[in-house]
Protein backbone atom coordinates (compact mmCIF):
# COMPACT_ATOMS: atom_id res chain seq x y z
CA UNK A 1 0.00 0.00 0.00
CA UNK A 2 1.30 3.44 -0.90
CA UNK A 3 1.75 5.80 2.02
CA UNK A 4 1.80 9.58 2.26
CA UNK A 5 5.35 10.95 2.08
CA UNK A 6 6.36 13.68 4.53
CA UNK A 7 9.40 15.88 3.98
CA UNK A 8 10.48 17.22 7.35
CA UNK A 9 13.27 18.83 9.36
CA UNK A 10 13.34 17.83 13.03
CA UNK A 11 13.87 21.29 14.55
CA UNK A 12 11.52 23.26 12.30
CA UNK A 13 8.48 24.40 14.36
CA UNK A 14 6.19 24.10 11.35
CA UNK A 15 7.34 20.52 10.79
CA UNK A 16 6.96 19.74 14.50
CA UNK A 17 3.30 20.65 14.53
CA UNK A 18 2.62 18.68 11.35
CA UNK A 19 4.29 15.60 12.83
CA UNK A 20 2.26 15.95 16.03
CA UNK A 21 -0.98 16.00 14.05
CA UNK A 22 0.04 12.92 12.05
CA UNK A 23 0.98 11.12 15.27
CA UNK A 24 -2.27 12.09 16.98
CA UNK A 25 -4.37 10.99 14.01
CA UNK A 26 -2.46 7.68 13.79
CA UNK A 27 -1.57 8.16 10.15
CA UNK A 28 1.03 5.83 8.67
CA UNK A 29 3.48 7.63 6.43
CA UNK A 30 6.97 7.65 4.96
CA UNK A 31 9.24 10.12 6.71
CA UNK A 32 11.96 11.86 4.71
CA UNK A 33 14.26 13.85 7.00
CA UNK A 34 16.20 16.54 5.16
CA UNK A 35 18.66 19.33 5.86
CA UNK A 36 17.45 22.84 5.11
CA UNK A 37 20.99 23.68 4.02
CA UNK A 38 20.93 20.86 1.45
CA UNK A 39 17.38 20.48 0.23
CA UNK A 40 16.86 17.60 -2.19
CA UNK A 41 15.61 18.10 -5.71
CA UNK A 42 12.72 15.75 -4.97
CA UNK A 43 11.34 18.35 -2.55
CA UNK A 44 11.49 21.13 -5.16
CA UNK A 45 9.90 18.81 -7.72
CA UNK A 46 6.67 18.62 -5.70
CA UNK A 47 6.82 22.04 -3.99
CA UNK A 48 8.89 24.72 -5.76
CA UNK A 49 9.11 26.91 -2.65
CA UNK A 50 11.22 24.20 -1.04
CA UNK A 51 10.03 24.64 2.55
CA UNK A 52 9.04 21.99 5.06
CA UNK A 53 6.81 20.34 5.97
CA UNK A 54 5.43 19.01 2.71
CA UNK A 55 3.29 15.92 2.41
CA UNK A 56 2.61 14.10 -0.84
CA UNK A 57 -0.55 12.02 -0.71
CA UNK A 58 -0.74 8.65 -2.46
CA UNK A 59 -3.38 9.84 -4.91
CA UNK A 60 -1.21 12.74 -6.06
CA UNK A 61 -2.12 15.93 -4.17
CA UNK A 62 0.62 17.81 -2.35
CA UNK A 63 0.01 19.82 0.83
CA UNK A 64 2.82 22.27 1.56
CA UNK A 65 1.47 24.38 4.43
CA UNK A 66 1.84 22.99 7.94
CA UNK A 67 -1.57 24.06 9.20
CA UNK A 68 -3.19 22.48 6.14
CA UNK A 69 -1.34 19.23 6.86
CA UNK A 70 -2.65 19.36 10.43
CA UNK A 71 -6.23 19.91 9.32
CA UNK A 72 -5.95 17.17 6.69
CA UNK A 73 -4.75 14.77 9.39
CA UNK A 74 -7.64 15.70 11.65
CA UNK A 75 -10.06 15.10 8.79
CA UNK A 76 -8.84 11.50 8.80
CA UNK A 77 -9.17 11.10 12.57
CA UNK A 78 -9.91 13.58 15.37
CA UNK A 79 -10.93 11.29 18.21
CA UNK A 80 -10.44 13.90 20.94
CA UNK A 81 -12.12 16.65 18.92
CA UNK A 82 -9.18 19.03 18.67
CA UNK A 83 -10.89 20.97 15.94
CA UNK A 84 -14.58 20.95 16.74
CA UNK A 85 -15.25 23.97 18.96
CA UNK A 86 -14.45 27.68 18.62
CA UNK A 87 -13.08 27.22 15.12
CA UNK A 88 -12.90 30.91 14.28
CA UNK A 89 -11.03 31.61 17.54
CA UNK A 90 -8.59 28.81 16.77
CA UNK A 91 -8.04 29.98 13.20
CA UNK A 92 -7.55 33.59 14.31
CA UNK A 93 -4.96 32.65 16.93
CA UNK A 94 -3.07 30.43 14.51
CA UNK A 95 -3.08 33.13 11.83
CA UNK A 96 -1.78 35.69 14.33
CA UNK A 97 0.92 33.28 15.43
CA UNK A 98 2.04 32.55 11.89
CA UNK A 99 2.22 36.21 10.92
CA UNK A 100 2.68 38.70 13.78
CA UNK A 101 4.13 36.42 16.48
CA UNK A 102 6.55 34.72 14.07
CA UNK A 103 7.69 38.12 12.81
CA UNK A 104 8.73 39.27 16.29
CA UNK A 105 10.00 35.84 17.29
CA UNK A 106 12.52 35.86 14.44
CA UNK A 107 13.77 39.29 15.50
CA UNK A 108 13.91 38.28 19.15
CA UNK A 109 15.86 35.08 18.44
CA UNK A 110 18.17 36.63 15.88
CA UNK A 111 18.34 40.19 17.17
CA UNK A 112 21.92 40.61 15.96
CA UNK A 113 20.64 40.31 12.40
CA UNK A 114 18.08 43.06 13.00
CA UNK A 115 20.01 46.00 14.51
CA UNK A 116 17.25 48.51 13.73
CA UNK A 117 15.82 47.74 17.20
CA UNK A 118 17.28 46.53 20.49
CA UNK A 119 16.94 43.07 21.95
CA UNK A 120 14.80 44.60 24.71
CA UNK A 121 12.40 46.11 22.16
CA UNK A 122 11.95 42.78 20.42
CA UNK A 123 11.42 41.09 23.77
CA UNK A 124 8.83 43.73 24.67
CA UNK A 125 6.92 43.16 21.44
CA UNK A 126 6.89 39.40 21.96
CA UNK A 127 5.80 39.85 25.58
CA UNK A 128 2.49 41.32 24.37
CA UNK A 129 1.58 37.97 22.84
CA UNK A 130 2.99 35.89 25.67
CA UNK A 131 1.12 38.00 28.21
CA UNK A 132 -2.16 37.37 26.41
CA UNK A 133 -1.50 33.62 26.36
CA UNK A 134 -0.55 33.67 30.03
CA UNK A 135 -3.77 35.46 30.94
CA UNK A 136 -5.84 32.80 29.20
CA UNK A 137 -4.02 30.05 31.09
CA UNK A 138 -4.50 31.62 34.50
CA UNK A 139 -8.11 30.40 34.42
CA UNK A 140 -7.88 27.35 32.13
CA UNK A 141 -5.59 24.44 31.37
CA UNK A 142 -5.45 25.18 27.65
CA UNK A 143 -5.90 28.21 25.42
CA UNK A 144 -9.62 27.70 24.81
CA UNK A 145 -10.68 25.96 27.98
CA UNK A 146 -9.84 22.81 29.90
CA UNK A 147 -9.42 20.61 26.86
CA UNK A 148 -6.57 20.57 24.38
CA UNK A 149 -7.37 21.98 20.94
CA UNK A 150 -5.62 22.26 17.60
CA UNK A 151 -4.48 25.77 18.52
CA UNK A 152 -2.48 24.52 21.52
CA UNK A 153 -0.54 22.10 19.34
CA UNK A 154 -0.13 24.55 16.47
CA UNK A 155 1.34 27.30 18.67
CA UNK A 156 3.41 25.18 21.04
CA UNK A 157 6.61 24.83 18.91
CA UNK A 158 6.81 28.60 18.43
CA UNK A 159 6.22 29.41 22.10
CA UNK A 160 8.87 26.81 22.94
CA UNK A 161 11.35 28.67 20.72
CA UNK A 162 10.48 31.98 22.36
CA UNK A 163 10.86 30.53 25.85
CA UNK A 164 14.32 29.13 25.25
CA UNK A 165 15.85 32.42 24.14
CA UNK A 166 15.78 33.50 27.80
CA UNK A 167 14.15 30.77 29.83
CA UNK A 168 14.50 32.43 33.23
CA UNK A 169 12.78 35.62 31.96
CA UNK A 170 10.02 33.55 30.36
CA UNK A 171 9.42 31.50 33.51
CA UNK A 172 9.45 34.52 35.81
CA UNK A 173 7.16 36.66 33.67
CA UNK A 174 4.67 34.07 32.40
CA UNK A 175 4.19 31.45 35.08
CA UNK A 176 0.91 29.99 33.81
CA UNK A 177 2.21 29.81 30.25
CA UNK A 178 5.40 28.20 31.56
CA UNK A 179 3.39 25.44 33.26
CA UNK A 180 1.39 24.89 30.06
CA UNK A 181 4.56 24.70 27.98
CA UNK A 182 6.26 22.21 30.30
CA UNK A 183 3.18 20.01 30.09
CA UNK A 184 3.33 20.06 26.29
CA UNK A 185 7.11 19.51 26.14
CA UNK A 186 6.94 16.41 28.34
CA UNK A 187 3.84 14.93 26.70
CA UNK A 188 4.05 11.71 24.73
CA UNK A 189 2.65 13.61 21.77
CA UNK A 190 5.71 15.86 21.63
CA UNK A 191 8.47 13.53 22.82
CA UNK A 192 7.38 10.87 20.33
CA UNK A 193 7.94 13.16 17.34
CA UNK A 194 11.27 14.56 18.52
CA UNK A 195 13.39 11.42 18.18
CA UNK A 196 16.47 11.87 16.01
CA UNK A 197 15.92 10.80 12.43
CA UNK A 198 18.47 9.54 9.95
CA UNK A 199 18.78 11.81 6.95
CA UNK A 200 16.90 10.65 3.91
CA UNK A 201 19.05 9.54 0.98
CA UNK A 202 17.55 10.59 -2.32
CA UNK A 203 16.44 7.61 -4.34
CA UNK A 204 15.91 5.48 -1.23
CA UNK A 205 12.80 4.80 0.79
CA UNK A 206 12.39 6.88 3.91
CA UNK A 207 11.58 5.78 7.44
CA UNK A 208 8.14 4.19 7.67
CA UNK A 209 5.87 5.13 10.56
CA UNK A 210 3.04 2.64 10.83
CA UNK A 211 0.16 3.29 13.23
Image (spheres, rainbow, N blue to C red):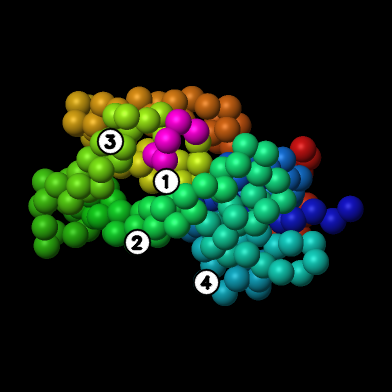
The answer, for residue 156, to whether it is visible in the render is no
- Residue 43, position as x, y percentages in the image: 62, 65
Frontmost of labels 2 and 4 is 2
Residue found 78% across the figure and 40% down from its top? 210
Q: Which mark is residue 134?
A: 3
Q: Quadrant of residue 6?
A: bottom right
Q: Residue at x 48, y 58 (%)?
A: 37
Instruction: Report, in whole angstroms, how far the alpha carbon at label 3 lies from the one at label 1.
Output: 13 Å
Range drawn in magenta = 143-147
Q: Which mark is residue 99?
A: 2
Decide which of tag 2 and tag 4 comes sooner along the chain: 4
| Of pointers 1 and 2, the one earlier in the residue sequence | 2
Q: Secondary structure at mark 4?
A: loop
**Crowd rating for badge 3 (residues with CA inside 10 Å; few <14, some 14–19, many 20+):** many
Q: Would you place residue 168 above or below residue 74 in this image?
A: above
Local crowd size for mark 2, using a 10 Å CA cut-off: few (<14), some (14–19), many (≥20): few
Q: Residue at x 22, y 58 (%)?
A: 113
Residue beneath disc 1: 155
Tags 2 and 4 in contact by the CB under 8 Å rule? Answer: no
Query: What distance separates the C-alpha of mark 2 from that of mark 4?
Result: 18 Å
Sequence-wise, which precedes: disc 1 or disc 4? 4
C-alpha separation, residue under disc 4 versus residue under disc 3: 35 Å
Question: Residue tagged by mark 4?
Answer: 49
Earlier residue among tags 3 and 2: 2
Residue 1 seen by the camera: yes
Which residue is farthest right?
A: 1
Mark 4: few, some, or many residues within 10 Å (few <14, many ≥20)?
A: few
Nearer the observer, 73 or 1: 73
Where is residue 122 drawn, in percent x and y?
17, 51
Mark 4 or mark 3: whose residue is earlier in sequence = 4
Amino acid sequence: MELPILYSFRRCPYAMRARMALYYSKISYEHREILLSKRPQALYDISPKGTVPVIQLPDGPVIDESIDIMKWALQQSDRDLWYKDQLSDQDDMIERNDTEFKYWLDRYKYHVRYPENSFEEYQSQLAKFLGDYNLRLETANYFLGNKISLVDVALMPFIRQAAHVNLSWFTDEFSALSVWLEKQKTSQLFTSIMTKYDLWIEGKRGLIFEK
